[in-house]
Image (cartoon, coloured by chain):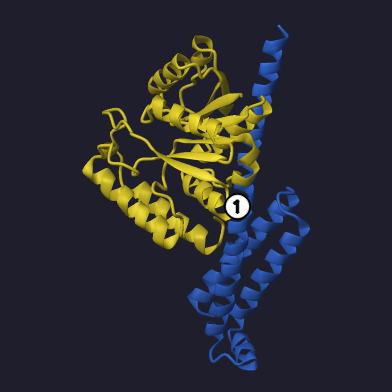
Amino acid sequence: MNIFVVIPAYNEGERVEFVIQELLGVGLNNIIVVDDGSINSIDHLQTKFPIILTEHVENLGQGAALKTGTELAIELGADIIAHIDADGQHRIQDLLKLIKYLKENNDYQVAIGSRFLDNSTKLPAKKKLILGLAKIFSQKLLMLNFSDPQSGLRVFTSKVFPKLYWQNDDFSHCSEILSRIGRNKIQFKELPIKVNYSDQTNPENKSISPQISMGWKLLKDKILDKI
Amino acid sequence: MTIFQTLILVAILVIITKAIIRLYRKEITVWLFLLWLVVWLGVGIIDVFPNTITYIALFVGVGRGVDLVIYIALLTLLYVVFKYSIRLQVLERKISSLVRKLAIKKSLEKHSKKNNI
């Protein structure tokens, strides 16, 4: 089975190199890095590692980068596609767990990592509050019954991609994919994962306002029945 | 004529002159120019003969002429904004699709080249 890992990268720098090294270390050799119009070119990654680098000439957003990477993977003959963040917040063993689950359970088309199925992730208080509110928001208002609506670690089969085909270019693709799973009645499995919130990915440094505007956008899309 | 009316008349003349220059330079189409001309000539007529708008307003059933102008202006602007927001969305989708297709095409070309060597 051909497994492809897609990493969307926007101004990531060194952190993405660690992720690539780790993936190669566990034998995941089909890696597609999507440079989403980064300010500084990351062409050097291509000479350093045996990866496929594809580049957006303009910054479009994470959703668009993942779509490009996934389409490219399928063109190159992928059977299973994995999405992982470039900042190293996801652990490789969790990714392997998701891949293994899909391989062993042929009825399932999608496996999603969830930070909330057990309490293994130590989240900073502020992050916990935001994610908690996001959860209530998406479960009660958007009617999405998933334990972690903003999870970026997911694995799915190439067969199911046409049904997942998300339209949102920005971060709201996370919720959009989940709502498509629900609407198309796709067999999915949520598995518990842990997330590293190291200094480099410290969410305390990020401001709250993107999350609020994202929530507003999701609600608007819901009213307009886009997701 | 009051100073206010004169100022508006001068402004209208400037706007129409600019439109003529733009038409001459082929920056705008003839139809857009005609539409622009009609709109500003209309404003000019109302400016010089303010009573005309009151007659029209009474005719269609709106109390004051000024109110009628505001209603029409608001509705027109709303329509234009709506139309442009849709256009913008379509344009964004097209750019996104263009950038993504370009990226995939380039990568596939590079990939097949690598495999041939």
Instruction: Write down which chain is painted blue.
Output: B
Closer to us: A103 or B29: A103
Q: Residue at x 56, y 25 (%)?
A: A4
| Local secondary structure at mark 1 | loop
Q: Relative to residue A122, is residue B66 drawn left or right?
A: right
Rendered colour, chain A: yellow
> Where A218 sits versus A194, above or below?
below
Q: In which quadrant of the rendered view does residue B112 lie?
A: top right
Vertical placement of B34 versus A63: above or below? Answer: below
Disc 1 designates what residue?
A184
Most extreme residue toward the right is B30
Q: Quadrant of the C terminus of chain A?
A: bottom right
Question: Where is residue A41 shown, x and y percent of the image?
Answer: 49, 21
Residue at 55 percent across and 70 percent down: it is B8
Outermost residue toward the left in this view: A125
Is residue B5 visible in the rendered image? The answer is yes
Residue A213 x, y percent position in the rendering = 40, 52
Q: Is residue A31 above or below residue B16?
A: above
- In the image, residue A80 lies at what x, y percent? 58, 30
Graded by Cα atoms within 10 Å as few (under 14), some (14 to 19) or many (20 or more), the crowding at tag 1 reads few
Q: Residue at x 66, y 59 (%)?
A: B17
**Residue in the picture at 30% in, 44% down:** A207
Q: Amino acid at mark 1?
A: Asn
Q: Residue B81 lies in what quarter of the image?
A: bottom right
Query: Relative to B54, does residue A76 appear above or below in the rendering?
Result: above
